[in-house]
Amino acid sequence: MLAATISAGNPAVADVSPPPAAAAAAADPFYSPQEPLPAGRPGDVIRWRPSTIGSLFGVLTPAKATAYQIMYRSTDDAGIPIAITGTVLLPMGRNPATLPIVGYAPSTHGIADTCSASQELVAGTDTDLININDALVAPRVIRCLIR
């Protein structure tokens, strides 16, 4: 869906500036939502930008996936609209419309902004990159997991 949103020119704002190094993530304006949030429903993309993927032991490289950082609408536990950020990885050479969607919800990596999963993907310090790579290059594994 996001791939269709990005390629179809969804009214969500595309921020084409590259993601900063992990050390500068806390100052990155991409992660500061506009106030008030734009109208919409939970799951609506507020903004997105192309991203990069760091390499953990040379396992996951940009040649295997195209990455996008996204900000989208959600709600907190009281039902109040909030903005959430994440990363979408699309396997290279595959039609995203025909692939299953796999959600990756990492455990807490730390309390600093630079410890967020999306920042660790950029820096190449997320130790789950090996498992993420397996899911990207071996769709048969994904099919087994979701059946």
Image: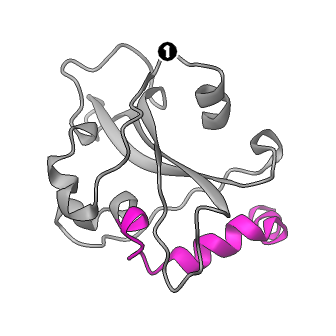
Q: Give whichever of 119, 50 is nearer the camera.
A: 50
- Give the magenta range: 120-147
Q: Is 16 above or below relative to 24?
A: above
**With 92 as the anchor, is 37 left or right in this view?**
left
Q: Give whichever of 14, 3 is nearer the camera.
A: 14
Image quarter hosting the N terminus: top right
**With 35 as the anchor, is 4 left or right in this view?**
right
Locate residue 91: give its quadrant: bottom right
**With 73 as the anchor, is 24 left or right in this view?**
left
Q: Is 119 above or below relative to 137?
A: above
Residue at image coords 38%, 45% = 18
Amino acid type assigned to the residue bearing label 1 in the image: Pro
Residue at image coords 68%, 50% = 101
**Where in the figure is residue 38, as x and y percent of width and height?**
33, 16
**Where in the figure is residue 26, as x and y percent of width and height?**
16, 53
**Where in the figure is residue 106, as x and y percent of width and height?**
43, 67
Locate residue 118: give its quadrant: bottom left
**With 67 as the anchor, is 117 left or right in this view?**
left
Q: Which residue is mark 1?
A: 11
